Image: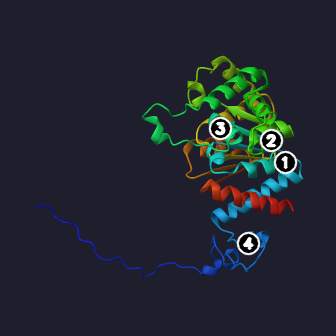
Amino acid sequence: MPSRKKFKPISSKGLKTYSIRERKSKVSVGDFARVPERGASLSEFLDVLPNILAAKDLKAVASAIVKAKRDEKTVALGMGAHVIKVGLGPLIIDLMERGVVDAVAMNGACVVHDFETAFAGVTSEDVDAELGTGSFGMAEETGRLLNRAIRKGAKKGLGAAVGEMIWRSRFPHKDKSILAAGARLNVPVTVHVALGTDILHIHPDMDGSATGLASMVDFKIFSSVVASLAEGVYLNIGSAVILPEVFLKAITLTRNLGYKVEKFTTVNMDFIQHYRPLTNVVRRPTMGGGAGYRLTGHHEIMVPLLYAAIIEGLD
C-alpha cells in the first residue's frame, strides 16, 4: 500500500487584515432603494430605484438617450418582431413622433406583424396548431399585399415601400403601424431580410429579386444612419441574429469609408443575452470608446420602463 499524506486543519493565526473603511466596496447604503410614497409620481418612483446593477444601467441608458437628444445626436433603434407582438408599437411610434428615435431598423418578421396589426387588428398565429396541417403562414392578404408593395416600391427600400402602402391605405389600425409612422414622419424605417426566413417568402407572389433589391437599399440607408452615431445611442431590442450582424457590417463599412463612428452608447435588451448581440452590439463597436449596456427582461415590462425614464428625463 502506498503511503498516504496527512492533512491537518490550517491555522488562520497571523492572518493580515485591514479596516473595512479602507476597502473599496461596490455597494453603499447611498445606493439602496428607498420606499416610494403612496401616490408618488413616476419620476419619483424612478428616483427611488436602487442605484445598483440593472436599475443603475436602466437609468444610465435613459440618461444617455436624453443627453443625445439634447446634443442633437442620433438615436437609432433596431428591433425584432416580438416587440410588436407584445404590443409595444405605440411606444415606439410616440418616440418617433417626439423626435427621440431618429431611425428604426427591423428584421423581416416585423413587417408581417406590423402589417397584420394595421390591416386586421390581430397578429401572431398559433404555429403549433397550424404547422401540422401546412396552414402556418398562409394568410392570403399578408402574402399578397406585402409582396405586391415590395415589388412595386423596391427601389425605395423595403421599409419605405411597405410603410407608404400602409400609410396611404384605409386599414382600420394603421395608427399602430411603425412602418406607416416612418412614412408619415419621414423617419427611416429599414427592413433587413434573410431570404427564406419569413412567411412572405413561401407565397406565390414572392419576388426574390425585388425583395433582395429592397433590402439592399435599406442596408445602405441604415449604414447612413450608423455613420452618424458618434456620441449617439443604438438600441437592439429582441433581435438575436439578423440585426446584430447587419449592425456590425454597417459599422465596418462606415469606418472603412472614413466616418468617425465612435464614443457612442449601445444597448441590448432581450429575455436572455445571446452571443451575437453582446459581441456585435455591446462589446466590439464600443471597444475604442463609448459604453455598452445589457438590460435583461421581458420586453413588455422593460421597454415601458425605459420609455417612461426617457420621457421623464426629457421633461
Kind of element beneath mark 4: helix
Relative height, residue 159 to residue 213 (above, below): below
Say which amino acid is labelled 3.
Answer: Leu
Say which amino acid is labelled 1.
Answer: Glu
Pointer 1 or 4: first along the chain: 4
> Residue 2, position in %: x, y?
14, 61
**Residue 20 lies in what quarter of the image?**
bottom right
**Residue 10 lies in what quarter of the image?**
bottom left
- Pointer 1 residue: 97
Kind of element beneath mark 3: helix
Q: Nearer the viewer, residue 58 or 177?
A: 177
Say which amino acid is labelled 4.
Answer: Phe
Relative height, residue 144 to residue 301 (above, below): above
The alpha-carbon separation of the residues under discs 2 and 1 comes to 8 Å
- Pointer 2 residue: 181
- Pointer 4 residue: 45
The alpha-carbon separation of the residues under discs 2 and 4 comes to 31 Å
Q: Nearer the viewer, residue 232 or 101?
A: 101
Pointer 1 or 3: first along the chain: 1
The disc label shown at residue 243, or none: 3
Q: How is colour applied across the structure in the image?
A: rainbow
Callouts 2 and 1 close, C-beta under 8 Å: yes
> Residue 281, position in %: x, y?
66, 43
Tag 2: Cα neighbours inside 10 Å, few (<14), some, or many (≥20)? many
The alpha-carbon separation of the residues under discs 1 and 3 comes to 23 Å
Kind of element beneath mark 2: helix
Pointer 2 or 1: first along the chain: 1
The alpha-carbon separation of the residues under discs 3 and 2 comes to 21 Å
Callouts 2 and 4 close, C-beta under 8 Å: no
